Amino acid sequence: MLGKIDNAILLVTRSAVVLLLAAMFGATLAGVFFRYVLNDALAWSEEVARYCMVWLSLLGGGLVFRGGGHIAVDLLVSRIGSRTLRTAVIRLAQAIVAVVLVVLLWQGFELMGRGKYMTTAALSLPMYIPYAALPVGGLLMLYHLIAAEFFTRDDNPGPRSRFDDAP
């Protein structure tokens, strides 16, 4: 049951990232075409591309985190001989990341609350829509931090790195 929910979350997030990337590309392409070919700039294309990039970065950050693709400095961890101590250091790092993500959630909700009285310049959308990327992205990253513990098949704690199998 939890595996199906996890797969659904991953599918929805990946689909959203693909759609956001396509929208960002389309808005940028339309902006360039209208500005330089038709000599009539679109007022909204840059704003759409910018807010798509914000959402894309935060949603994609969770996916990259889940796959272990974020940069990691494992100089200290790789030199720890004791498996128990190495696991404890990894767990401490994960706890610090979790605290930072909770702060991101909290501050993101605060910013969303302030953004409901503002609008974007070109599209006149409420600013809480672009600001919502912070708590949504933070929540997804926190979810992936926790889910990596339950859905990782090997005995390495934390999100899987693509370098885990390197000699």
Image (spheres, grey):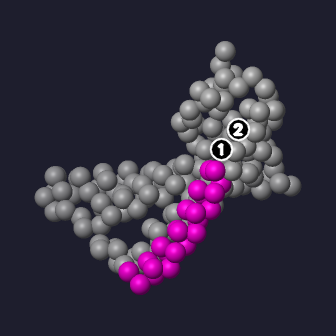
Say above or below: 125 vs 52: below
- Could you tell whether 94 is left or right of 28 in the image? right
Say above or below: 93 vs 102: above
> Residue 130's mark?
none
Q: Residue at x 36, y 78 (%)?
A: 119
Image quadrant occupied by the N terminus: bottom right
User: Under tag 1, what secondary structure?
Assistant: helix
- Could you tell whether 108 is left or right of 28 in the image? right
- Could you tell whether 3 is left or right of 120 in the image? right
The three-letter code of the residue at mark 1 reads Ala
Any magenta on residue 127?
no
Q: Are marks 1 and 2 in contact (CB under 8 Å)?
A: yes
Any magenta on residue 111?
yes
User: Under tag 2, what secondary structure?
Assistant: helix
From the top left corner, tell me how far across and down residue 111 is, in percent. Answer: 48, 73
Looking at the rendering, which quadrant does residue 72 occupy? top right
From the top left corner, tell me how far across and down residue 102 is, in percent. Answer: 62, 62
Q: Which residue is under mark 2?
A: 89
Q: Which residue is under mark 1?
A: 93
The range drawn in magenta is 96-118
Neighbour tally class for label 1: few under 14, some 14-19, many 20 plus, Cα within 10 Å: few
Say above or below: 111 vs 141: below
Q: Residue at x 30, y 60 (%)?
A: 46
The three-letter code of the residue at mark 2 reads Val
- For the residues marked 1 and 2, what is the alpha-carbon distance in whole angstroms? 6 Å
Residue farthest left in this picture: 39
